[in-house]
Each structure stands twice: as C-alpha cells, then as structure tokens.
Amino acid sequence: MDEVIKRYQEVQKLPNTEVSVSRDDLVRLSEAWRAEDIPDLQSVVSDFQIKEFRSGEIDPVFISLVRILERLSKERIATFLDVACATGYYKEVVESVLGCTAYSGADYSRAMIDRAQAKYAGTPFSVQDATNLTFQDRSFDVVMLSGALEHIPYYEQAIQQLCRVSAKWVILHRLPVHAGESLENIHTVGTQYSIRTPRTYFSLDFVISEFRKHGFGMVVNTPTYKPSWKSLIRRAFKLSSTERDVRSLLLVRVG
C-alpha cells in the first residue's frame, strides 16, 4: 500500500488542491482526461499493481472489486464491459476471477485505448464516450465503471448508458461519496496526474435513485478500502473532508 501511494504521488505533476465549484464549471474540463501523457503517468502505478497481482499480492484498490467479482462468479457471466477502462489493466483482475469471460474495454481517450491495445493484443477495445455508448441494448452481462463517474459532468447520462447496455449487472467501483446531511452532490475541481479535473462526491441516495429510474437496484454497497486505511487514503488523495469516502457498488436489473 505504501509503495502504491509513493508511486502515485511521484507522478502527480500539479499541486493536489481541490476547490468547490458549480456544476456548470465542470463541463469546461471534461476533455482533460484525453491528455496524451496520462497513460504513461498512470501506468507507473497500474503496472506495479498488476505485477503484484500476478504474484498473488492483491492491491487494496482491487480487494473490494475481487469480492464483488467472486459473488458474480456464481452466475453465468459470458460478457463483461469495462467502461472508462484506461489502459485495460482491470482485464487481468476480471479474468482471474471470472475465468474465460469475454472482456471488452472502452475509453474516450484515444491515447488510453492505443496503450490498452498494445498491452492486450486481440482484446476488443474501442474509443467510446460513457455518455453515448454505441453498443446495443443489454449486450453485456456485466458493465463496470471504475474511478470515472466522478469525472463525468453529465453523470446522469453515463448512468443511463451503463444501465442500457447491461443485461443484468452494473459495478460502480471506486465511487467517491459524501456522508453529509445534504442530498445534493458536491462538485469540485482538483488535480490528478498532469491535469485539472472535475470531481463529484455523490450522495448515495442520488445514485440509488438514478439507477432505480433505469430498473436497477443495489445489492452490494461496500467500502473500497477497509476502515483502517481510511485516514491513509484521505491524506494520500487529499480528501478534504472526513465526511467523504470511496465506495464500491453492485447493482442488478430488477425491471
């Protein structure tokens, strides 16, 4: 855990500060994740995590996902879509738990997809916008979005698209939430790697309500990191409030 955080901090090219903004302010930064240097910077961290994973050391960020995937391993899972897949490294985690499941990845960054195709030749990767996916309705048994919904200004559209292309299951992994009394989402602008980026801390009630609109109900709501790591994660990623957390959710089609 310490080594991952050290590597993460080493590749941050901007001061890690975060300020509250209106939702309208998020849109002007919505293209930031297409920056061509991000795959190299992110890979410093993710390549180390995957190397450790191959040797049997499961990184803390993978643990809650592995537990969700283990639950799904009891189901008949033939197809899996990783939306905002970055360089595709979750492919190894997914396939290690679910076996020969057909993994596909999509990301709106051409630079990320080029790197993913180079790393995992033969895997279907495509450049896709999470708010306007081109896949057919209910074309994947499981659809996952990890560490990305908070960066999408039009997150309602992204949720609708996740639900539309999922035949049964949706995984929201690494979802920033707030535990304050407000039911409103909190919008901020911060920095990550070499860019200024939008970030939303969601009201969990809002997220559940949005998925319910599209016929999905929540069956798992678990901390992404175990409680003993919470203060460490807050310091490393500069979470400015003790009322903010990171969750991993599993949702199932009920309608």
Image: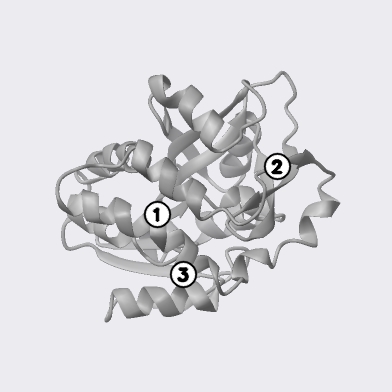
Where the N terminus falls, by quadrant?
top left
Task: Please tell me which residue is depicted at 61% across the width and 65% down the height of the picture.
Answer: 33
**Would you call the spot at circle 3 few (<14 residues within 10 Å), some (14-19), or many (20 or more)?**
many
Labelled disc at residue 45 = 1
Q: How many marks?
A: 3
How far across and down, in percent of the image, does residue 245 sit?
Answer: 55, 29
9 or 146: which is nearer to us? Answer: 9
Up the image or down, 126 lies above or below 227; here it is below
Q: Which circle's residue, 2 or 3, is located before the other in the chain?
A: 2
Q: Which circle's residue, 1 or 2, is located before the other in the chain?
A: 2
Do the residues bearing badges 1 and 2 touch, measured as CB atoms within 8 Å? no
Which amino acid, mark 1?
Val
Up the image or down, 245 lies above or below 147; here it is above
Res. 142 visible in picture: no
Q: Which residue is mark 3?
A: 106
Task: Please tell me which residue is depicted at 52% across the width and 36% down the height of the picture.
Answer: 236
Between the C-alphas of marks 1 and 2, the distance is: 20 Å
How far across and down, in percent of the image, does residue 88 sit?
Answer: 37, 65
Q: Quadrant of residue 237?
A: top right
Identify the element where label 3 is drawn. Answer: strand
Q: Which residue is mark 2?
A: 17
Do the residues bearing badges 1 and 3 touch, measured as CB atoms within 8 Å? no
Between the C-alphas of marks 1 and 3, the distance is: 20 Å
32 or 154: which is nearer to us? Answer: 32
